[in-house]
Amino acid sequence: MGTRKAVVGDKIISVKGIKGKVEKVKENSVIVEIIENLSEYEFMNNRTVVSHKNYMVI
């Protein structure tokens, strides 16, 4: 989906509607601190993992 891979500190929005700030970049995904959850999903904490294929840097 995205045009480039995110770096630490970037803000992203996922395909599922999760807006967040990148905390760590891995080979195939990023760990994101959730800022706004527009999805139908609920999270136990304020972090999630998003594949590089499933977000766009904003």
Image (spheres, helix red, strand yellow):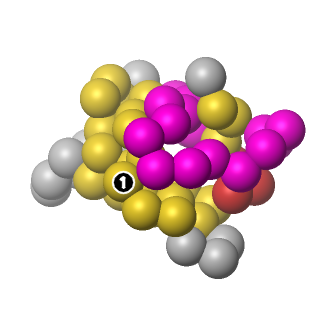
Q: Is residue 39 visible?
A: no
Q: How packed is label 1: few (under 14 Cα within 10 Å), some, or many (20 or more)?
A: some
In percent of width and height, residue 10 lies at 50, 36
Q: Is residue 12 left or right of residue 42?
A: right
The part of the image, by quadrant, that contains residue 4 is top right
Report the residue at 56% width, 50% height from top.
7
Q: Which residue is mark 1?
A: 23
How far across and down, in percent of the image, does residue 9 sit?
42, 41
Q: Is residue 40 left or right of residue 57?
A: left
Query: Residue 1, position in %: x, y?
Result: 81, 41
Amino acid carrying mark 1 in the image: Glu
Magenta-drawn stretch contains 53: no
Q: Is residue 52 above or below residue 13?
A: below
Q: Secondary structure at mark 1?
A: strand
| Segment colored magenta | 1-18
Q: Main secondary structure of the magenta part?
A: loop
Q: Is residue 56 left or right of residue 11?
A: right
- 37 shown above or below 53: above
Residue depicted at 71% across the width and 51% down the height: 5
Residue 42, above or below 28: above
